Image: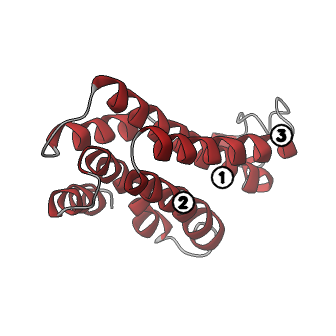
Amino acid sequence: MSLVVFTALCGLILAPGSVGLETAIIAVICIAAGAGASGAINMWYDKDIDRIMHRTQDRPIPAGRMNPKEALIFGGLLSVGSIVNMHLFVNFAAATLLAFTILFYVFIYTIWLKRRTPQNIVIGGASGAFPPMIGWTAVTGDIGWGAIALFAIIFLWTP
């Protein structure tokens, strides 16, 4: 989570132009909430394998601290809330990228790739490369070459 917030801040700072402090804080909170939502949905989906893997046995669902249905609802509401607030208080383009990032993480990485290929982390790494792009777009209102360069740096560094 700290890497998500840090890279989102990098995108906000490196983008040409500026936004008010309040808008920047809202953007970072929305990005962090979107990452948390993706993680909650990922843990809901992986509850069966998290129970048997030593590294993940203490996560809230396998440890019995959270009901799977509640985790899914929480993740869904947090996803929607982060996207809606990004749209209302920052801009539509950043909200669209945030929505795409959440959907990519949940459907492409978690559901489609994670259990099928060891390359899941390479391809799924795109999810972790979107936060600086979203931060940049929160400032500029569109996806520029600088945002794409930030995405590429993180994506190529991940594997």
Judged left or right of residue 57, residue 8 is left
Q: Which residue is the extreme one toward the top?
A: 21
Task: Give the answer, above or below, for where 156 lies relative to 21.
Answer: below
User: Measuring 65% from the left and 41% from the top, which residue is drawn there?
Assistant: 78
Judged left or right of residue 111, residue 9 is left
Tell me the quarter of the image containing the C terminus: bottom left
* Label 3 packing within 10 angstroms: few (<14), some (14-19), many (20+): few
Find residue 129 and report its horizontal and vertical position in percent: 34, 55
Secondary structure of the residue carrying tag 1 is helix
What is the C-alpha distance between the residues marked 1 and 2?
8 Å
Q: Are marks 3 and 1 in contact (CB under 8 Å)?
A: no
* Label 1 packing within 10 angstroms: few (<14), some (14-19), many (20+): many
Secondary structure of the residue carrying tag 2 is helix
Q: Which residue is mark 2?
A: 105
Find residue 16 and report its horizontal and vertical position in percent: 12, 46
User: Measuring 40% from the left and 66% from the top, which residue is drawn there?
Assistant: 122
Task: Give the answer, above or below, for where 26 lies relative to 54.
Answer: above
Q: Which residue is mark 3?
A: 70
* Label 2 packing within 10 angstroms: few (<14), some (14-19), many (20+): many
- Which residue type does callout 3 highlight? Glu
User: Measuring 50% from the left and 68% from the top, which residue is drawn there?
Assistant: 120
What is the C-alpha distance between the residues marked 2 and 3?
20 Å
| Mark toward the start of the polypeptide (3 vs 1) | 1
- Which residue type does callout 1 highlight? Asn
- Which residue type does callout 2 highlight? Tyr
What is the C-alpha distance between the residues marked 3 and 1?
13 Å
Which is in the foreground here, disc 3 or disc 1?
A: 3
Q: Are marks 1 and 2 in contact (CB under 8 Å)?
A: yes
User: Measuring 32% from the left and 41% from the top, which residue is drawn there?
Assistant: 8
Which label is found at residue 42? 1
Secondary structure of the residue carrying tag 3 is helix
